[in-house]
Image: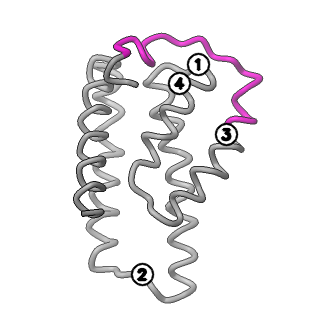
Amino acid sequence: YVLFNPKFGKEEDIQEEKVIPLTVGMGTGIGFYEGFLGPGTGSMLMAGYIKGAGFGMDRAAATARILNFGGNIGSYAIFAVAASVNYEVAIPFALANMIGGYLAPGYVLKYGYALLRPMFLVVAAIMITVQILNFI
């Protein structure tokens, strides 16, 4: 859908009355998905905010990151209580996530939609490919 709709997320037309119900609905549905599979959660949240509440891609990306972070913290807490955290994998991923979280806002503010849309499409294509390869 995003590939064939070049204006998807380019302009904002925020519908405030839809933000909270949409967040609760996506948090429940996508949170359930994230608990079992995980990949693509941020992209689904972004698309949901763009399509469902009229967010621009930059605001949708920022809001999705906050929700995704909350889901990650919740997942970590559950796995930590069960003593099932693989810190050899978790620590490098957490560091990479922090570096990306530090660098990304500057690029988004500087380049905006011109950067976000291609990045969104590339990441979505990679995730779809990985999921297909894992399924085969």
Q: Secondary structure at mark 2?
A: loop
Q: Which mark is residue 54?
A: 1
Residue 93 at what x, y percent from top left? 30, 64
Residue 134 at what x, y percent from top left? 27, 63
Which of disc 1 and disc 3 is earlier in sequence? 3
Q: Residues within 10 Å of mark 4 (few under 14, many from 20)?
A: many
The segment highlighted magenta reads 5-23
How far apart marks 2 and 4 lie (CA) works out to: 34 Å
Residue 74 at what x, y percent from top left? 58, 66
Q: Amino acid at mark 3?
A: Thr
> Badge 2 is on which residue?
85
Q: Residues within 10 Å of mark 1 (few under 14, many from 20)?
A: many
- Which residue occupies 26% across, 67% down? 92
> Badge 4 is on which residue?
50
How far apart marks 4 and 3 lie (CA) works out to: 12 Å
41 displayed left or right of 112: right
Q: Secondary structure at mark 4?
A: helix
Which of disc 3 and disc 2 is earlier in sequence? 3
> Badge 3 is on which residue?
23
Which of disc 3 and disc 4 is earlier in sequence? 3
How far apart marks 1 and 4 lie (CA) works out to: 5 Å
Q: Quadrant of the N terminus?
A: top left
14 displayed left or right of 80: right
